[in-house]
Amino acid sequence: MLRVGLTGGIGAGKSAVSSRLAARGAIVIDSDVLAREVVASGTDGLAEVVAAFGPEVLTADGEMDRPAVGRIVFGDAEARRRLEAIIHPRVRARAAEIEAAASDDAIVVHDIPLLVETGQADRFDVVLVVDVPAAVQLERLTQQRGMAESEAEQRIASQATREQRLAVADVVVENAGTLAELDTRLDEVWTTLRERAGHGPDTKA
Ligand SMILES: CC(C)(COP(=O)(O)OP(=O)(O)OC[C@H]1O[C@@H](n2cnc3c(N)ncnc32)[C@H](O)[C@@H]1O)[C@@H](O)C(=O)NCCC(=O)NCCS
Ligand SMILES: Nc1ncnc2c1ncn2[C@@H]1O[C@H](COP(=O)(O)OP(=O)(O)OP(=O)(O)O)[C@@H](O)[C@H]1O
């Protein structure tokens, strides 16, 4: 098994990369998806979040009110750490379970937004960083995701810097260009990953 850690700043294009690697045959484990599952309605994770932040972080339907929690934690590093202390161990446990079910020859890509912030670079055979300038992150988050500029800036500021990510990268995927350019680059990256995994040439069409 080849274990790949995929990271990048918010809006850099991790999902765009992971979906394209999945299409080429990778098993993708997405931390953002798991971070939702572990605080789904009725979980002990959600109960801990309510114990830590109060019932006002629940919607009328008993779900976690994500915008409300976002407003609390992205302006307050201490509150963010309390939320992460509840969610991250659960995400890691679930990711390990999913990975354990993958075959020995799988290329497993862990999509982890906070890989650098949480000091996980050494856990992977290959660290793949999706890199764009902050101006591109801002533009994509505001124009394609409809996020307010102030919110986008706050999230970018709560993450590692571009330089900190590049410092731990084994492979850098530059994604300031078009999606067609990204596809071409990922053909190269996929070949490299297959070589690292000890696979022969990719015979898939
Ligand atoms: C604060 C929450 C409720 C906001 O939810 P929301 O639906 O608006 O955002 P979503 O979860 O889809 O995250 C979007 C992006 O925000 C960034 N982000 C999320 N959490 C964090 C964090 N703790 N620190 C810095 N950036 C973060 C990441 O780039 C992520 O890809 C949510 O992000 C959360 O529960 N965060 C804590 C868990 C966590 O650290 N998740 C990130 C990877 S495990
Ligand atoms: N090369 C590109 N050209 C144009 N748009 C792009 C490109 N790459 C990604 N995008 C778009 O930019 C936005 C952010 O990309 P994506 O969701 O893949 O980022 P992400 O790193 O997964 O973000 P998050 O940290 O929130 O999970 C999306 O709307 C996506 O479709």
Image (spheres, rainbow, N blue to C red):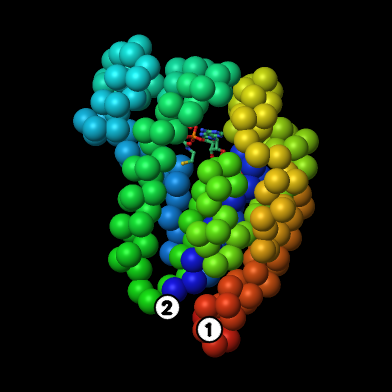
Q: Which mark is residue 130?
A: none
Residue drawn at (53%, 43%) of the image: 118
Q: Position of residue 9 (x, y in %)?
A: 64, 42
Can residue 108 be seen here? Answer: yes
Residue type of the residue flagged with mark 2: Asp
Q: Position of residue 167 (x, y in %)?
A: 72, 53
Residue drawn at (45%, 50%) of the image: 30
Give the structural element (helix, strand or loop) at label 1: loop
Q: Position of residue 128 (x, y in %)?
A: 62, 59
Residue drawn at (68%, 49%) of the image: 165
The N terminus lies in quadrant: bottom left
Q: Position of residue 64 (x, y in %)?
A: 35, 24
Q: Residue 102 lies in what quarter of the image? A: bottom left
Q: Which residue is mark 1?
A: 198
Q: CA distance from mark 2 to mark 1?
A: 8 Å
Cβ(mark 1) to ligand 2 < 8 Å? no
Residue drawn at (33%, 14%) of the image: 54
Q: Is residue 103 left or right of residue 146?
A: left
Q: Is residue 108 left or right of residue 117?
A: left
Give the structural element (helix, strand or loop) at label 2: loop
Q: Could you say which is closer to the camera, residue 44 or residue 17?
A: 44
Rendered position, 91 above or below 24 = above
Marks 2/1 in contact by CB < 8 Å: the verdict is yes
Q: Residues within 10 Å of mark 2 (few under 14, many from 20)?
A: few
The C terminus lies in quadrant: bottom right
Q: Residue furthest bottom?
A: 200
Can residue 142 be seen here? Answer: no
Q: Which residue is mark 2?
A: 105
Q: Residues within 10 Å of mark 1 (few under 14, many from 20)?
A: few
Quick one: label 2 or label 1, which is nearer the N terminus? 2
Residue type of the residue flagged with mark 1: Gly
